[in-house]
Image (cartoon, rainbow, N blue to C red):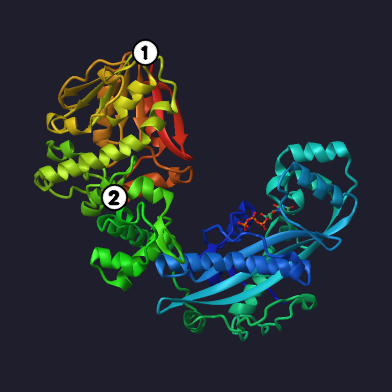
Amino acid sequence: MVLCPVIRKLLHKRVVLASASPRRQEILRQAGLRFEVVPSRFKEMLPKALFPSPPAYAVETAKQKALEVARRMHQKDLRAPDVVIGADTIVAVGGLILEKPVDKQDAYSMLSRLSGKEHSVFTGVAIVHCCSRDGRLDTDVSEFYEETRVRFSELSEDLLWEYIDSGEPMDKAGGYGIQALGGMLVEQVHGDFLNVVGFPLNRFCKKLAELYYPSGREDPRPAQSHQGRGGRDEDGGERTQAAGPEEAVSSRTGHSPPPFPTGLLELVDSFKASKALFTACKLKVFDLLKDGAPLKAVDVAGKLGASACGTGRLLDACVALGFLQKTDRGYSNTETANLHLTSDGAYSLRGLVLHHSDHPWDLSARPESAGRDGVDPHDGALGERTGPPCQASCAHSEETRLGLLRAMHSLAKLTARHVATAFDLSRFGSACDLGGCTGALAYVLAREYPRLRVTVFDLPEVLQHVAGFQPDGPRTEQVSFLPGDFFEDSLPEADLYVVSRILRDWPDGKVHELLSRVARACKPGGGLLLVDVAAGPEAEAEAEGLRRRAGGERSAAVYAHLLRRLGFADVRAAGAGGRPLALLGTRGAP
Ligand SMILES: Cc1cn([C@H]2C[C@H](O)[C@@H](COP(=O)(O)OP(=O)(O)OP(=O)(O)O)O2)c(=O)[nH]c1=O
């Protein structure tokens, strides 16, 4: 069939790739498709013996992967994406299906089975069109597979083990990657190379053409029958005319609708998810479900004095978010909820959640900055000043301030050990935590470094509240509190200055001013530990733009650049839980 430009047909749709495979993502991205990645949680454990042929197994697995994601997304947001794409690649040799090896021995038996022979690589693909109607999810599945035949050379034992020891086989069907080192093993390829790598792009485009050019309005030739090549299609029950109404309009007018606003809709969705969390915390749902037996929605509703229907929806949303689990017996907390969302959990973040729920624009603004002349934490973060600082000041009632302290304390407590151990700080004898608030980080630093004396430097109106947050236990005498304003007063002498979670909503000028003061106070060889950099390597590039739009963290690269400009050398970054967390710079000679 003649290929038409089909990828653009998906540009204005919300497309999700239900796959964690980096190869699939790359192939589709390079083809110009715009999509989100939501890896499927479907376990690839269908009983192979039930399938008439290996590709039938691959197609069904691909379909189940895509459907799982469509259902999960629908349950979470009550709005499924327009299209979910799932794929599954298998290797078949002598009627046997080989998936990813479970260990080196398994990789060895797979590769020795393939040595000197021809095998088939099948990738099954499912394109699931979704539609949410009255809270129900309708799906329309189109599926196909592609076969590529691959011949391996005879492989020596040495080569086999050398290849296995490279680690490459482990996440690949049949235990090899034709696109990398595994290419060495291959003598001949018959068919689509990309199909072996995990996604049959050419056949995918043909399938899209069948779906999106129903009666040849744009394609000079009418769509072919769905039998495809060699009658291999497994398109049972698929729709023959997948173009939606907007397709029809666009093909009539020749006008292309704008690209799908994925980022914008993600923001809306994440707001809905946060809202469910805020509401459940406010209603103390997690306290209610803490220790006892699971409860049905109607019982939870009764205890909360809320409607059964609304409560059921809220509980289901919490299930989708991973905070509750649901069984026949009812709803109960997950581990995360017990630990972080109950009122009295050791690492409770409920205070933080409630604070953000009640003061969405305060985010991580600190109580003292609201009252300080000229320091409006939102200045710059929102692009312009949002009003005179006194407004923010008035908004900070005593109760609000305590709520904010509680929120900051719980967050600092949770992350303090990661921060304290992100670098070896044992060379420092004294530290000053600027804006260290309740001392949550200071106490953990003291515990980790018995030689370290830590001064928490913060405004008097903040320090007057900290008594209620002091921990019992050893070495509390290493920590002292000193009232002061780090913009007005001289900074206490210290070998190490700590600036943790206070800069994120500040305008660049204020950040520069504070860090310059630190740089001037810091002795050569002294350090600056800066905590709170943007998460995720991909976030680095976006962080600046995002921060400018909505306030938030700066990327590690931006901070590192600034620290170097201010005379800090050997600036190193450390992360925790896969996220960048902190930077440590050492003051060079002035
Ligand atoms: C044969 C072969 C497979 N592969 C890869 C493609 C697939 O990623 C993987 C087969 O496993 P799959 O289960 O198809 O995919 P996956 O587990 O990587 O991702 P997901 O289930 O989330 O979709 O093997 C290669 O990269 N090169 C090859 O030469």
Type of the residue with mark 1: Ala
Q: Nearer the viewer, residue 266 or 90?
A: 90
Type of the residue with mark 2: Val
User: Crowding at label 2, few (<14), some or many (≥20) Cα neighbours within 10 Å?
Assistant: many
Residue 389: tell me if it is visible. no
Q: Residue at x 37, y 36 (%)?
A: 415
Q: What label sits on residue 349 in the rendered view? A: none
The picture places residue 427, in percent across and down from the top left corner, at 40, 14
Dot 2: element: helix
Measure the C-alpha gap from mark 2 to mark 1: 44 Å
**Can you tell me which quadrant of the image ligand 1 is in?**
bottom right
Q: Nearer the viewer, mark 2 or mark 1?
A: 2
The residue carrying mark 1 is 589
The picture places residue 312, in percent across and down from the top left corner, at 35, 69
The residue carrying mark 2 is 353
Dot 1: element: loop
The picture places residue 115, in percent across and down from the top left corner, at 87, 49
Q: Nearer the viewer, residue 582 or 543?
A: 582
The picture places residue 92, in percent across and down from the top left corner, at 80, 60
Mark 2 vs 1: CB contact within 8 A? no
In the rendered image of this protein, does residue 476 appear above or below residue 99?
Answer: above
Placement of the N terminus among the 4 image quadrants: bottom right
In the rendered image of this protein, does residue 137 appear above or below residue 500?
Answer: below
Residue 263, located in which quarter of the rendered image? Answer: bottom left
